[in-house]
Image: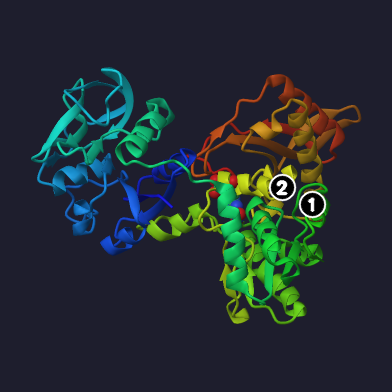
Amino acid sequence: MENVVIIDCGSQFTQLIARRVRELKAHSTVLPWDVSVERVQKQNPAALIISGGPESVNDPDAIVLAEGLWELDVPILGICYGMQLMARTLGGQVVSGERPEYGLTEVHRKGSSRLLEGFPEEGEVLMSHRDRVAQVPDGFRVTAETAHGVVAAMEDDAGRRFGLQFHPALAETGQDLLLSRFLFDICGCKGDWKLDGWVSTAVEKIRAKVGPGRVVCGLSGGVDSSVAAALVHKAIGSQLECIFVDHGLMRMNEARHVLDSYAGLGLSVRHVDASELFLSRLAGVTDPEKKRRIVGQLFIEVFDAEAAKIGSVDWLLQGTIYPDVIESGSKKGSALVKSHHNVGGLPEHMKLKLLEPLRDLFKDEVRELGRLIGVPDAIVNRQPFPGPGLAVRCLGEITRERLDTLRAADAIFREELTRAGLYDKIWQSFCVLLPVRTVGVMEEGRTYSEVLALRAVNSQDAMTAEWVPLPSSLLEVTAKRICSEVPGINRVVLDVTSKPPATIEWE
Ligand code: XMP
């Protein structure tokens, strides 16, 4: 299989580049910046892409790549930091702080270029740099410049090393053309990576790995764990046993729908109704992190107890996907914003081996795989839903009554979005019940009830998100219906904050 190796120097666009490469039907693998040359060679790369990064190559402790990497007999494309690193390592010069450029910037081509051949002489690209290449290495030439004389693109005379100061993976820059030129015309990639071929190999691999062993899986209704279970079921059938821990924090009728879908897939699922337990442990807790910890820990306890009833089990199936692998592999360290508790944290004493058949796939590919193997649309297209469920959408104290209020309002919002044909077009939409009471007036007189917030965001990967401007007619009817149909709410507000500065969930 041809492979495009992307070395991650810390850019937030690394995953986006890796995804774009796969969309072009070439397989991509992201490796951390400190990877050894041997490990890169093992991937048998057809192309190497060095990502951008937040640092300056002139910092004394800046990221540098393993020495022999630049000598590999494979075309290399350096992007932003990747280009500057290429320039500096191969004998050029990079200066810091002079002529920084941000946003859409005019560039023009200079002389002949293998990479830019056929592209317009002038155009706009998205720049974001403080440092710039002041002198290209011997054997290189500048192939595009900005109006300020900043090197926008460079390449070597052998036509094997290329640098771009701008982000080729952003929509505004016509990314697919530049990337596909690099991959197909320069690196000779064929673009024949296909998911259906992947499925039969994955099924064989799972069979060989598991042998006669038994596998247990925690299902949450989410896309990843559901597709993982469907795939493993395809491979080993009844050797797979699933557990659905119902924490009582799902949306209206959600547990029922999810279980019906699993039954339709032929999965054997143990349904544990642990809602009483979860709600009693959450009683009186208002701190968001405490709520998350309680749900996460309790989930593992309940899952563990149920798994013990199955008897001897050898493997724990998890729906880990590629972004989880990349994120835990190459970060230099980031601040904790919230602890995301996901289904199926491994209880140490269970001594189970981990089965993670989706480790190599991006979310879009998991969805495509799900469709290929017959997972119902309701699950494949399900909006992301946090592990702690409505616990982090019911701000303040969690009681059964407040949860029911939130569920009823959320169902109305969903109904109206669906009626307007918007529900499936939006990344995430939901309601948040606030522990704030305001005065209102209804037919029967004064009310003093809680406030409900509507949230709708679009996102690519949940790292950033933009609030969605919903039609005012939809907002009006939603607010009217919620206030008249849901006791306990007399005011509806709209969250118009993107991420950053806010997060998607309120807690
Ligand atoms: P935030 O609120 O951090 O959320 O912007 C980013 C995305 O992650 C989802 N989310 C979670 N998913 N377990 C999960 O599996 C969690 O604990 C969790 N918390 C938030 C959130 O819905 C959004 O899609």
> What residue lies at 31% left-to-right and 41% top-to-bottom?
187
Three-letter amino acid code of the residue under disc 2:
Ile
Q: Is residue 277 above or below residue 465?
A: below
| Residue 486 pos. (x, y %) | 84, 38
Q: On the rendered structure, is 190 left or right of 128?
A: right
| Residue 299 vertical placement versus 464 (above, below) | below
- The answer, for residue 341, to whether it is visible in the render is no
As shown in the figure, which amino acid type bears the numbered disc 1?
Ser
The residue that mark 2 highlights is 379
Closer to us: 373 or 445: 373
Q: CA distance from mark 2 to mark 1?
A: 8 Å
Of residue 445 and residue 98, the one placed in the foreground of this image is 98
> Which residue is disc 1 drawn over?
261
Residue 62, placed above or below residue 446: below
Q: Residue at x 64, y 58 (%)?
A: 228
Render colour scheme: rainbow
* Image position, residue 216 (x, y; %): 69, 70
Q: Is residue 370 left or right of residue 491?
A: left
Give SS at disc 1: helix
| Residue 239 quadrant | bottom right
| Left or right: where 114 falls relative to 471 | left
Residue at screen point 62% across, 61% down: 203
Q: Is 496 on the left-hand or right-hand side of 484?
A: left
Dots 2, 1 in contact, CB < 8 A: yes
Number of other residues with Cα within 10 Å of mark 1, as a class: few under 14, some 14 to 19, many 20 or more: some
| x and y percentages locating residue 487 in the rendered image | 85, 39
Residue 437, x across and y down, in percent = 73, 40
